[in-house]
Image: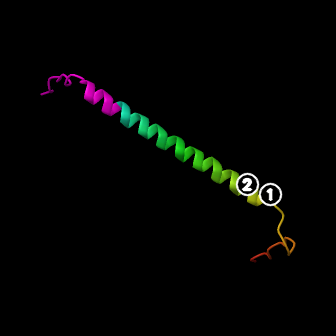
């Protein structure tokens, strides 16, 4: 037998504020992670483009 629908409790100012705070915090965290990833990618790209100091690049011998 299916259950009867149950109404949700009324939204109080406190619950609204807590939810907004949680949303804001998670958005900030997401943005921080995104920024960190972008910086990291930039650093890695910079490392790859710079020429090697000292020895020239040499090919690895074939494993066969």
User: How many numbered badges does the structure rendering display?
Assistant: 2
Taking the view exactly as shown, the residue that stands out farthest to the left is 1
Closer to the camera, 17 or 52?
17
Residue at 85 percent across and 74 percent down: it is 54
Quadrant of residue 9 in the image? top left
State how far apart marks 1 and 2 are (Cα): 6 Å
Residue at 83 percent across and 72 percent down: it is 59
- The relative height of residue 50 versus residue 3 in the rendered view (above or below) is below
Of the 4 image quadrants, the one containing the C terminus is bottom right
Query: Of helix, strand and loop, which one carries label 2?
Result: helix
Q: Is residue 16 magenta?
A: yes
User: Decide: marks 1, 2 in contact (CB < 8 A)?
Assistant: yes
Question: Residue 60: horizontal and vertical position, in percent?
Answer: 79, 74
Q: On the image, numbered disc 2 is attached to which residue?
A: 45
Residue at 53 percent across and 41 percent down: it is 31
Closer to the camera, 49 or 58?
49
Query: Of helix, strand and loop, which one carries label 1?
Result: helix
Question: Residue 30: horizontal and vertical position, in percent?
Answer: 50, 42
- The relative height of residue 64 versus residue 37 in the rendered view (above or below) is below
Number of other residues with Cα within 10 Å of mark 1, as a class: few under 14, some 14 to 19, many 20 or more? few
Per the rendering, the mark at residue 49 is 1
Type of secondary structure dominating the magenta stretch = loop
Closer to the camera, 61 or 37?
37
Question: Residue 18: horizontal and vertical position, in percent?
Answer: 31, 33
Residue at 21 percent across and 24 percent down: it is 8
Residue 58 in the figure: left or right of residue 64: right
Residue 13 in the figure: left or right of residue 62: left
The span picked out in magenta is 1-19
Closer to the camera, 5 or 24?
24
- The relative height of residue 54 versus residue 13 in the rendered view (above or below) is below
Per the rendering, the mark at residue 14 is none
Q: Is residue 12 magenta?
A: yes
């Amino acid at each position: 037998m299916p259950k009867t629908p149950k109404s949700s409790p009324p939204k109080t100012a406190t619950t609204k504020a807590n939810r907004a705070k949680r949303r804001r915090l998670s958005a900030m965290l997401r943005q921080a992670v995104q920024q960190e990833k972008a910086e990291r990618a930039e650093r890695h790209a910079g490392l790859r483009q710079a020429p090697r100091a000292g020895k020239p690049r040499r090919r690895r011998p074939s494993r066969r």
